[in-house]
Image (tube, rainbow, N blue to C red):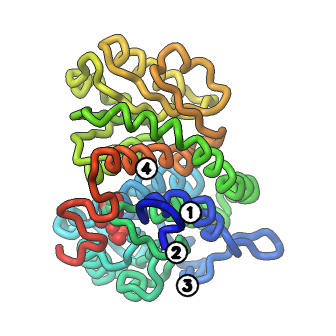
Amino acid sequence: EKDGHDWFMRKEIFEQPRAVADSLLGRRSQSGLLQLDEMRLSDDEIRDIDKIIIIACGTSFYAGMVAKYAIEHWTRIPVEVELASEFRYRDPILDYSTLVVAISQSGETADTLQAIRHARTQRSKVLAICNTNGSTIPRESDAVIYTHAGPEIGVASTKGFLTQLVACYLLALYVAQVKGTRYGDEVDEVMAQLEAIPEQIETVLAGAQQIYDLAAEHVDTRSVLFLGRHAGYPVALEGALKLKELAYIHAEGFAAGELKHGPIALVEPGLPILCVVPPRGRDQLHEKMISGIQEVRARGARTICLAEEGDTKIEPYADVLIRLPRVPVLLQPLVATVPLQLFACELATVMGHDVDQPRNLAKSVTVE
Ligand code: F6R
């Protein structure tokens, strides 16, 4: 049942090309327009939305952070992302023109469920992004986008996360199409880029051995930092979470621009820092990231850089270079997360931990 893999988690990491492809399947009509089966919000209701609040926990929360970049870019609707456990207890401002998006792989997370129940008492529409058909969160929502990853058994979310990202991109493009924003015209182009992702994930998986060797070098490591910017920032947080929960190592993710505001004090010779380097583009993201990497390297950090094919500027600053396929910055989390999942899974394995049942954790957290 693990298809020859030692863990469900590893099997699920390797299933991601298929999971992402399934998540994209049947989303376009003959005319090329996006269609979401269980959207159940009318075009008028969508046009009325003036604010989106995304609520989720853990890895699903990081998917929400990525979603914010995509939704705001393509729809121009302001998006807030909040931890479900915080949202519920702070008297949030909600009304009928607020769309609340709840992201939950299991559909049973108690904090997220309580948050949507509260939102509905305030007359907000709730859309669930969920992997589990017929679970409580989608049942109690006005609309749902199912992620179609197939059952996720490993406690650490992997294919659940990647397909949540796909669902978030689809939601953003769908709203852009309905609202007729300028970016609605990009639907075709972005869908083609998304459809190329499964093969690009295959390429990353084909390089797994490099990541395994890297993990083996880090068995005695006590602390690892992760840096990212823009859509790479939530990827850094996700990489750190995977390492904490599986390898029980202290790990922290930072927005690279925040380094100089405090965290750089943590850097000491030999500290491994995994850096998610944004694709080269017209903005200054790439150069800003490189200068952050230079800063930590000058202080003796060991820089392990994830950077796109063809990026030669990073080479002098990378102690280890892991190549990623070339994709637009908004979609980069779909490829950049995969090496970090492999790293955590392998490091936990060589440390002798039970990857599918990490200590103190449960697959679905049904208590608040
Ligand atoms: C981390 C992980 C958790 C879940 C979180 C939310 O690998 O799996 O952080 O993401 O408990 O769970 P769902 O998405 O089921 O609401």
Instruction: State whether residue 56 appears in this view.
Output: no
Q: Which mark is residue 15?
A: 1
Mark 3 lies on a secondary structure that is: loop
Q: Which mark is residue 150?
A: 2
- The C terminus is located in which quarter? bottom left
First of labels 4, 3 by sequence position: 3
Q: Quadrant of residue 62?
A: bottom left
The answer to the question of whether label 1 and label 2 lie on touching residues, with beta carbons closer than 8 A, is yes
**Other-residue count near label 4 (Cα within 10 Å), few / some / many at <14 / 14–19 / ≥20:** many
Amino acid type at mark 4:
Gln
| Residue topped by disc 4 | 341
The answer to the question of whether label 2 and label 3 lie on touching residues, with beta carbons closer than 8 A, is no
First of labels 4, 2 by sequence position: 2
Mark 1 lies on a secondary structure that is: loop
Q: Specify the farthest residue to the right.
A: 31
Query: Is residue 61 placed above or below 103 in the rendered structure?
Result: above
| Residue topped by disc 3 | 40
Q: Position of residue 290 (x, y in %)?
A: 48, 21
First of labels 1, 4 by sequence position: 1
The answer to the question of whether label 4 and label 2 lie on touching residues, with beta carbons closer than 8 A, is no
Query: Is residue 44 placed above or below 23 in the rendered structure?
Result: below
**Other-residue count near label 1 (Cα within 10 Å), few / some / many at <14 / 14–19 / ≥20:** some
Query: Is residue 304 placed above or below 155 in the rendered structure?
Result: above
Amino acid type at mark 1:
Glu
Q: CA distance from mark 4 to mark 3?
A: 34 Å
Q: Residue at x 48, y 56 (%)?
A: 67
Q: Residue at x 59, y 44 (%)?
A: 204
Amino acid type at mark 3:
Arg
Q: CA distance from mark 3 to mark 1?
A: 30 Å
Amino acid type at mark 2:
Gly
Q: Position of residue 64 (x, y in %)?
A: 41, 58
